């Protein structure tokens, strides 16, 4: 007999089934034992009656979180015991036999609660148990549904999904790189990508025209409570597209995704309001305004676009740096200022960010597709001719071979999902997150490596072996 998933038991009333899963709750009443069973699809109540002697003996020794295989008959509950609005609230299983597939130690924490009352160190150390709780099961499934919806939407709109390398070159893009030593070319290093930015632009040069990727990004940033060293972007790039076309496409995707997957949510304003960076700073004091009319409504989503960002800002040393990334194009009317390196502080970028309830969930721009314009950006930032060629020569060479005008955007998928699920931080929507200090408590990483590994890589450290 094949296994039946718990969500499908309603179709088997009066029939015998096999259910496999975990014991969620056990209640021993002496002459009979009640077991709440769960699998990936839901929960159901089962009862072991005295006339099934062998099953009762096994049921009396099982404990919560044991993995079992149960043979049972699906019965309608008596009218007085029906639980309205609950999965399988009108049926229960009459257990015929119980096979223990695996015993379990007493878990170090309750996995049936929402988990908010449990310390983060315990939750992350035993994350494989933490993920059993219904709240996180829901979050992981919504994450799957959201990425699948985005994939299908973009595929229908002519995009193709392309993976880009995780071992790449270290370039000065903003944050610190995580670096990986080369064993074969000792003394040289790969970098893990802070984003697929350069690769996706090179794909536009390659004539792919419409690219997307659910992309893993790594940044070695300073400690912050709601920051992860690795995170996920919904990344896309389009050739021959205007700013308006990219914004309209993403707005349509966001609206449809929310309305389809989280119909309980209400989008405050459609189409999304647009506000300039200057207006946002003057009115809200930040560039990711929370425009909700009622901040006590957990199902209210207030999207907005923030546009007309300054291209450059002063860094801590008094020089110029970019506000988003060096690959953005200026507003067309400001291209002459860029090329002449004048009115630098007044140049506006073709940057567009989408904010949601006070969080930036996405950002993009039209890019500089002409090498001369990119060179000017890098010169303004203080890069020498030699440094530009060393760090960005591959991009400049590519742009010299007929690069089309192009632009794109990247969503912070973790942040977007945390808002959709009303979670306090992005760790609640990531399967295996790290602490705010970047530690993986479950795998005990980062960790030391052996002297033999260091020798093979040609690396010496200051620590004593």
Image (tube, rainbow, N blue to C red):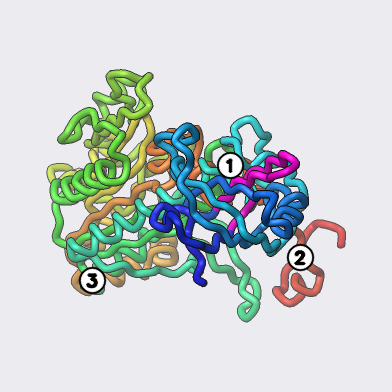
Kindly identify which residue carries mark 1: 222
Task: Tell me where residue 103 sits by quadrant.
Answer: bottom right
Residue 288 to residue 184: above or below:
above
Identify which residue is drawn at 68% across, 43% down: 26
Which comes sooner in the sequence, label 3 or label 2?
Answer: 3
Label 3 and label 2: CA atoms lie apart by 41 Å
Residue 246 lies left or right of residue 144; in this view the side is left
Mark 3 near mark 2, Cβ–Cβ under 8 Å? no
Residue under label 3, please give it.
208
Which tag, 1 or 3, sits closer to the chain's start? 3
In reply to whether residue 33 is colored magenta, the answer given is yes
User: Where does the image place residue 372, in percent across and percent down from the top left?
Assistant: 24, 60
Q: Secondary structure at mark 1?
A: loop
Secondary structure mostly seen in magenta is strand
Q: Nearer the viewer, mark 2 or mark 1?
A: 2
Point out residue 289 in the picture as x, y percentages from the top left corner: 32, 27
Q: Is residue 227 above or below residue 372?
A: above
Task: Classify 10 Å Cα crowding around label 1: few (below 14), some (14-19), many (20 and above).
Answer: some
Residue annotated with mark 2 = 449
Q: Is residue 385 magenta?
A: no
Q: Is residue 213 visible?
A: yes
Nearer mark to the viewer, of 1 and 3? 3
Q: Tag 3's secondary structure?
A: loop
Question: Of callouts 2 and 1, which one flags the residue occurring earlier in the amino acid sequence?
Answer: 1
Residue sitting at x 82%, y 57%: 463
SS category of the residue bearing label 2: loop
Report the magenta residues as a range. 21-38
């Amino acid at each position: 007999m094949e296994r039946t998933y718990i969500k499908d038991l309603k179709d088997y009333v009066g029939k015998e089934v096999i259910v496999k899963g975990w014991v969620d709750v056990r209640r021993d009443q002496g002459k009979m034992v009640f077991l709440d069973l769960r699998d990936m699809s839901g929960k159901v109540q089962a009862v072991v009656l005295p006339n099934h002697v062998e099953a009762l003996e096994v049921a009396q020794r099982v404990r919560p979180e044991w993995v079992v295989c149960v043979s049972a008959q699906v019965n309608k509950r008596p009218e007085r015991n029906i639980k309205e609005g609950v999965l399988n609230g009108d049926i229960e299983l009459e257990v015929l036999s119980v096979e223990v597939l695996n015993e379990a130690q007493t878990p170090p924490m309750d996995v049936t609660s929402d988990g908010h009352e449990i310390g983060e160190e315990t939750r992350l150390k035993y994350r494989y148990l933490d993920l059993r709780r219904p709240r996180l099961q829901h979050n992981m499934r919504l994450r799957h549904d959201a990425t699948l919806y985005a994939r299908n939407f973009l595929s229908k709109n002519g995009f193709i999904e392309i993976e880009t390398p995780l071992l790449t070159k270290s370039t000065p893009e903003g944050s610190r790189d995580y670096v990986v030593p080369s064993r074969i070319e000792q003394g040289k290093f790969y970098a893990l990508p802070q984003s697929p930015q350069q690769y996706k632009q090179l794909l536009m040069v390659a004539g792919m025209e419409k690219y997307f990727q659910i992309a893993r990004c790594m940044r070695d940033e300073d400690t912050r409570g709601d920051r992860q060293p690795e995170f996920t972007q919904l990344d896309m790039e389009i050739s021959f597209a205007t700013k308006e076309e990219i914004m309209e496409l993403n707005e349509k995707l966001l609206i449809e995704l929310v309305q389809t997957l989280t119909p309980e949510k209400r989008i405050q304003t459609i189409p999304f309001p647009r506000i300039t960076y200057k207006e946002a700073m003057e009115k809200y004091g930040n560039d990711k305004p929370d425009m909700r009319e009622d901040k006590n409504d957990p199902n209210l989503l207030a999207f907005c676009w923030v546009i007309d960002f300054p291209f450059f800002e002063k860094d801590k040393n008094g020089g110029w740096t970019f506000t988003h990334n060096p690959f953005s194009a200026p507003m067309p009317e400001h291209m002459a200022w860029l090329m002449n390196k004048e009115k630098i502080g007044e140049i506006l970028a073709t940057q567009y960010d989408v904010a949601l309830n006070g969080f930036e969930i996405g950002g993009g721009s039209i890019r500089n597709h002409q090498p001369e314009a990119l060179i000017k950006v890098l010169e303004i930032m203080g890069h020498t001719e030699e440094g530009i060629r060393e760090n960005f020569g591959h991009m400049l060479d590519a742009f010299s071979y007929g690069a089309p005008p192009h632009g794109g955007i990247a969503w912070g998928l973790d942040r977007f999902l945390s808002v959709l699920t009303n979670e306090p931080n992005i760790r609640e929507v990531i399967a295996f997150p790290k602490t705010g200090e970047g530690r993986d408590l479950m795998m005990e990483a980062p960790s030391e490596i052996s002297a033999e590994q260091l020798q093979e890589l040609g690396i010496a450290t200051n620590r004593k072996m």
